[in-house]
Image: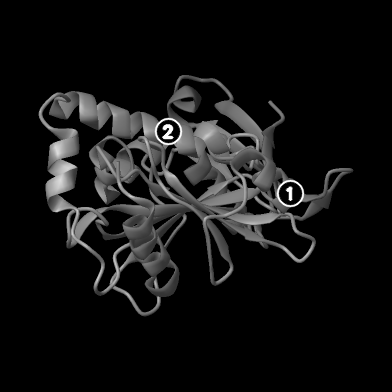
Amino acid sequence: MVGKKPTFKVIAASLLTGSVLGIGAPSFTGLAHAASGTSISYSETNQMAVDTLNNLYDQAFSGEMPGNVQGLKINKSTRRAVHQKFGSPQEVNNQFDLYSWEMGQPGYGFAYNKDNTISEIRNFGTGVERQTNLGGITPELLEKELGHANKILNVPGTNELDYIYKTGDYELHFVIGDNPILEGFDQTVNHVNLTANKTHISSGTAAVKYLRHQLKMDNNDDIVFSDMGGDLKKDKIGSYYKIKLTSKSIQEEGGTGTVGLYKVYQDGTYKSEY
């Protein structure tokens, strides 16, 4: 098990640089290899990483992360709820309360709004057999499982990239950077952030692009998306654009071709009307 003191040297560095490996952080190379050993095959490891990724993505739509932090919700759960679940933080660094990884459980950081509700949950992954979780997630795996990211940003002051996926009212940020166990930039996920969605869709064209991506139809040449004039409408939920989906192949066979009708709200929420 990784001791708490070196764990925080690694985790705290991420809060200053965007990476969970800081200058002077200890090397865990030998420990990582000894902990992982050869008991887990590559295919098993890869599938576990895939499962981790999809669980993170699925839970994000409810404003939560899976695992032992499930039930703690962005902008709903309070600092007190976190303390009741995990106790007092083992360290406070910048705006984050930190809880170290141990016994195969990920390390976490929590940031709070002024009203003491959670504003951000940060998952640092595990310190052992990391390749079964965040250490097994690459940009290629992100695209294969989740499609193209809504945004890819450079993390200021680092060589890291932030792959942002919109999940309804929330956002998942997969930060690709230095591996905190095996020193060096290895193109795997360094940590994952869950925050509130800052999306604001302001045109029919933007609504079409957003919905196409959410439905994982970026590369579908048969389905045509139409914003039906691009007028902004309103109901009791909020302001939205109506998007119609039409199949060219069905039209060619003599049908109407209509395969979907959606309301896409300005905050990124969408629902089928078909």
Q: Nearer the viewer, mark 1 or mark 2?
A: 1
Q: Position of residue 224 (x, y in %)?
A: 50, 40
Q: Position of residue 264 (x, y in %)?
A: 68, 45
Q: Residue at point 59% right, 34% down?
A: 70
Instruction: Report the colour scheme.
Output: one colour
The amino acid type, in three-letter code, at marker 1 is: Arg
Q: Vertically, is 166 above or below 43?
A: below
Secondary structure state at the residue bearing disc 2: helix
- Counting the numbered discs, the total is 2
**Viewer-proximal residue among 1 and 264:** 1
The reply to whether callout 1 and callout 2 are in contact (CB within 8 Å) is no
Q: Position of residue 218 (x, y in %)?
A: 41, 44
Using the image, tell me which numbered label, if any, was put on residue 54: 2
Say few, some or many: other residues with alpha carbon within 10 Å of mark 1 (under 14 / 14 to 19 / 20 or more).
few
The residue to which callout 1 is attached is 80
Q: Position of residue 138 (x, y in %)?
A: 26, 47
